[in-house]
Image (cartoon, helix red, strand yellow):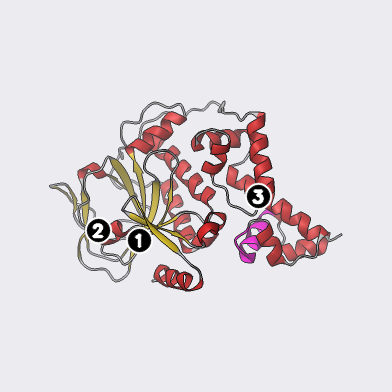
């Protein structure tokens, strides 16, 4: 209901552009040409909505390679209709269904095979599905889930970019075995989906890279290297990225955008950037925005709303939260203590 009301309110205030993505999802670009400056690519998936008998299935997607995007989708209903989710067509891909609350799904069907589930599935108990088996579940309670989706082609391509061997599929040691890392990621993404306007492309892409890194080691059998990464950026690449960001702080460049400037893949760029700069790209971008804001607060009389938009924050509230986290003071308090 909250997402539906948000969409109605947004469409009444701005000219929204709504278009299909690969015939399966709808992307919302809230302010047309300005959308990439302020928000990540948000997705409404009508296919999942229909399969789970939902009004809406909001999510984010990150396209980090030339293959299918990694998708994060929230599936929620408190007024459930007892029945079954419909079986999807077979697909060479995987999904993790992570309950955010205790749920009571009944039997699981993998094609024509039935699997008995525990009476209750606990929050944080992820279930890994091979989508080639066309899974469906019996719906017998309200539920609130975060669904992670990744194709085999995307798994392989991102692994190749990291210099790793091909991952021949994913397997869960014990079906529904708890994974605190995936659960925490699900909780963070659920919070982000409640305030999608304050979420950047780079945040979603970094979550996607972290998700891929975790699952290929935890569920794909890929070895974890304990050696320091030798990924590096050349001086011209660092200069190109830093110059661009410094002159375009009001925009919201994604990891893919910055990687393209350096003629690198997003996964290699993120790894090399962290190795060279000591922090992830989106953390560095936020730090540069805060530094620009500090200079404006110290040397000008510009209002906080002007400072926030000039430095690339979504709004004054977003600016205040980020600034306080970095500096330990609100922007107003910091200005009072440091004004020239």
CA neighbours of label 3 inside 10 A, class few (<14), some (14 to 19), many (20+): some
In this rendering, position of residue 322 left or right of residue 56 = right
- For marks 3 and 2, the one nearer the N-term is 2
Tell me the quarter of the image containing the C terminus: bottom right
Instruction: Name the residue: 26% across, 61% down.
Output: 50
Secondary structure mostly seen in magenta is: helix
Residue 80 place in picture, x, y as percent: 26, 68
In this rendering, position of residue 210 left or right of residue 317 = left
Residue 77 place in picture, x, y as percent: 32, 66
Residue 142 place in picture, x, y as percent: 29, 66
Foreground residue among 50 and 187: 50
Let me know if residue 219 appears in the view: no
Foreground residue among 126 and 257: 257
Q: Gap between marks 2 and 1, in whole Å?
A: 10 Å
**The quadrant where residue 240 appears:** top right
Q: Which region shows up in magenta?
A: 313-326
Mark 3: which secondary structure?
loop
Residue for badge 3: 248
Mark 2: which secondary structure?
helix
Residue 57 bears which disc, if any?
A: 1
Let me know if residue 175 appears in the view: yes
Q: Gap between marks 3 and 1, in whole Å?
A: 33 Å
């Amino acid at each position: 209901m909250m997402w539906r009301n948000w969409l109605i309110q947004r469409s009444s205030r701005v000219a929204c552009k709504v278009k299909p993505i690969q015939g399966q999802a709808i992307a919302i670009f809230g302010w047309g040409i300005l959308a990439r400056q302020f928000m990540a690519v948000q997705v409404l998936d009508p296919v999942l909505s229909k399969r789970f008998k939902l009004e809406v299935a909001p999510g984010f997607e990150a396209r980090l390679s030339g293959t299918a995007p990694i998708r994060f989708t929230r599936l929620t209903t408190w007024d459930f209709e007892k029945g079954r989710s419909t079986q999807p067509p077979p697909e060479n891909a995987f999904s993790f269904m992570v309950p955010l609350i205790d749920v009571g799904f009944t039997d699981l069907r993998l094609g024509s095979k039935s699997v008995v589930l525990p009476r209750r599935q606990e929050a944080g108990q992820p279930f890994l599905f091979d989508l080639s088996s066309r899974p469906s579940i019996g719906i017998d309670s309200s539920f609130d889930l975060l669904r992670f989706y990744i194709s085999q082609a995307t798994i392989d391509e991102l692994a190749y970019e990291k210099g790793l061997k091909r991952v021949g599929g994913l397997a869960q040691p014990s079906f529904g075995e708890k994974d605190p890392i995936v659960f925490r990621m699900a909780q963070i993404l659920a919070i982000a989906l409640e305030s999608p306007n304050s979420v950047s492309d780079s945040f979603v892409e970094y979550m996607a890279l972290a998700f891929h890194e975790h699952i290929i080691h935890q569920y794909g059998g890929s070895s974890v290297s304990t050696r320091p990464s030798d990924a590096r950026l050349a001086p011209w690449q660092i200069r190109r990225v830093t110059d661009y960001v410094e002159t375009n702080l009001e925009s919201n460049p994604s990891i893919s955008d910055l990687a393209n400037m350096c003629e690198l893949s997003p996964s290699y760029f993120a790894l090399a950037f962290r190795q060279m700069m000591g922090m992830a790209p989106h953390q560095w971008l936020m730090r540069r925005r805060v530094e620009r804001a500090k200079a404006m607060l110290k040397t000008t009389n510009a209002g906080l709303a002007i400072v926030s938009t000039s430095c690339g924050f979504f709004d004054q509230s977003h600016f205040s939260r980020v600034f306080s986290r970095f500096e330990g003071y609100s922007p107003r308090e910091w200005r009072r203590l440091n004004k020239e």
